[in-house]
Structures are given as C-alpha cells and as structure tokens.
Image: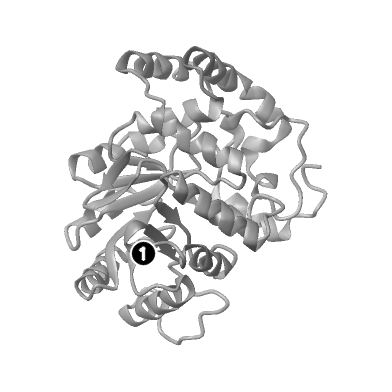
Amino acid sequence: MKTRKLRNLEVSAIGMGCMGFTHAYGETPSESDGIKLVHKAFELGCNFFDTAEMYSYFKNEEFVGKALKDLPRDKIVISDKFWPEKFQGHDFAEEKLSETGIRKSLEGSLRRLQTDYIDVYIEHQMDDGSEEQVAFVMGKLIGEGKIRAWGQSSATLDQIQRANVVTPISAIQSEYSMMERKWERDVIPYCAANNIGFMAFSPLGNGFLSGKYTSKDEFTGNDIRRVITRFASENMDANQPLLDLINRFAADKNASPAQIALAWVLAGGSFIVPIPGMRKESRIKENLGAADIELTAQEYSALNAELAKIKIHGTRDGKDIKKLGTVPDNVNK
C-alpha cells in the first residue's frame, strides 16, 4: 500500500471510514464479522481508521476499539471526531467546547477506543466562532501527548485560517468526490499550500459512484440514503451521465467504477486521502486496490473536462440527514 502524509502523520493512501459498521447504510455486519473486515483491511495495507463519538452515539468508537485492540498500536493511525455540542451520554456540566468539555469528551473516546492517545482528533461539523478557542486546547493536548495532531471537519477557509495560526492543523475532513467539489475553490488549495492533509469522506458519493445502485433500489430503516436527495429515484436517473463517463474510463483502465472514482480523488494531490466505507471483503480489496490505479495528467485533465459538462442532481446535506429520525419508514420505498 502506498502512503501519504497528513502534515507529519504517515497514513495509507486510502483509509477506512468505519461509520457503516454500526449505522447509516442499512443492515450492518455482526461485530465479529466487522472486526474481521477491519483486520483484512489492515492485512492489505490500510493503517488509517476513522470514527466519531457521534456515530451511533459512542457505539462506533467502542466497535473500533475492539477491532483495533489486537493490532500493533504503533502501526495504526486512528482518526476520531468530537461533536461541538453535548448529546445524550455527555453528563458533564461544562460547555462542550470549553477546555474541560473537550478533555472530558477525549477521556471518554480514549476509554472506548482502548488506547492512551488519538492520532488525529477532529472537531466534527464546525461550530462557527470557536476556532481559536478549540485550537488552543488542541495545542495543549498535543503537548501532553494525548493526541498527536488535530483537525476540522467541513470547515470553511476562514475557520481553517483562524485556527491554523493558533495550533497548526494536520487534517481537514470534508466530503469530496466527483459529486461534491465545492472545496476545490479555496480549501483544497489552502491545504496544498500549507502542508495540511485533506481527508475525503464519501469519496464514492455514498456508494452511488460504485455503479452498484439504480433508481429501483430501496433504502429503508436507518439508511441515510433515504434522505440524501442524490438517491431520489429521479436524481439517480438524471445522474446516469456521470456513471457513463466513469464506466468509459474504467473500461480503458481495466478498473472498476469505484476504483476510477477513488483514483480521481487521489489524483487531486498527494495530500488527499479518501476514507471510503467498506463492509464486504470484496469491497475492501476493490477500494484499496484503487491506490494502484494511476490517472496520468492527461487522463485526469480529460476526465475533469468531461465532468465540467455534467450537472449533478441532488445533494448530501447534513440537515437532511438529521431528519432521518423523523422520516416514516415508507419514505423512498
């Protein structure tokens, strides 16, 4: 497996997003099967694993802790995210983004992850106005060895700049794929110029870019694709030209559509690390294999030229996802 750097942290060129092991994409594997899949990813060269306290309200961290405890700690890199607001299970009185609040959140995450440090600790879904305050606390935690580095998720350029001057940021984690490119305007160039890594979540457009779903597929239960408008049947049909384009490049490169989508993300810069979710051994092999699919400068340019002609229908909006708990089960059936 090739490696990349998030500032000073060396990680596998493709990481594993672990959210799907406990929620968000329909039926989840059993805990034992999930642990086997994490170990298979490690066996194939993936050393970078991402979780968050918000995922399944701590259960995802607990799963990741169990999955990683038998792997050599010095050979793995853990990315974890803390939510800017308290939620059920946070029984302390202090504000979440106060120093005390952050420390108590970190203590809980360390316990659930069964480790004494987190490699990159990320503020999840940025809270506007707290950047300098949080950055100062992160600097103290780095100095104490409780975290090795820190980052922000879905941050604007202004938020990144304000925090980076207080304590250098190692990673920005935001959605980035052929379906979501807004960060190319300013955040990604800033990361490139300032030695900040960029972790691309949902690099396969929540699975759409794998080409494995059609407008006839049904998303039920807690599957977030029920409320992501890209997966409305009319939008899936309207986005077919994007899949057609990917399929043409996949045929030319003897690769799968998912591998082309990931190779495109990787081609955006050596500081960009996609972290797709993978819950089947076949998908782990396929996704990690994308690290060996290289787009030439000419191919990357040609692909971007074609992408510029395609309109993307639907979005992945956090506000829509928050509606999941109130959406009737029959929506999108």
Quick check: 304 left or right of 321? left
**What is the x, y in percent for residue 226?**
70, 46
**Residue at the image point whose x is 62% and y is 28% from the top:** 211
Rendering coords of residue 181 (x, y %) = 42, 33
35 or 232: nearer the eye? 35
In the image, is residue 183 above or below residue 58? above
Q: Position of residue 283 (x, y in %)?
A: 58, 39
Q: Is residue 272 above or below residue 153?
A: above
Residue at the spot of label 1:
73
Q: Considering the image in quadrants, where does the N terminus appear? A: top left
- Residue lying at 50% horizontally and 32% vertically, measured from the top left: 179
Answer above or below: position of 132 versus 264: below
Q: Give SS at disc 1.
A: helix
In the picture, measured across the screen, residue 160 lies left or right of residue 241, that is left
Q: The disc labelled 1 sits on which kind of residue? A: Arg
Outermost residue toward the bottom in this view: 93
Image quarter hosting the C terminus: top right
Along the viewing direction, whichever of 33 and 159 lies nearer the viewer? 33
Q: Looking at the image, can residue 204 be seen?
A: no
What is the quadrant of residue 108 in the picture? bottom left
| Residue 185 image point, x, y percent | 32, 34
Residue 104 visible in the current orientation: yes
Q: Residue at x 62, y 44 (%)?
A: 280
Residue at 40 percent of width and 50 percent of height = 154
Residue 332: which quarter of the image? top right
Q: How is the image coloured?
A: one colour
Count numbered badges in the picture: 1
Instruction: Characterize the local packing of mark 1: few (<14), some (14-19) or many (20 or more) Cα atoms within 10 angstroms.
Output: few
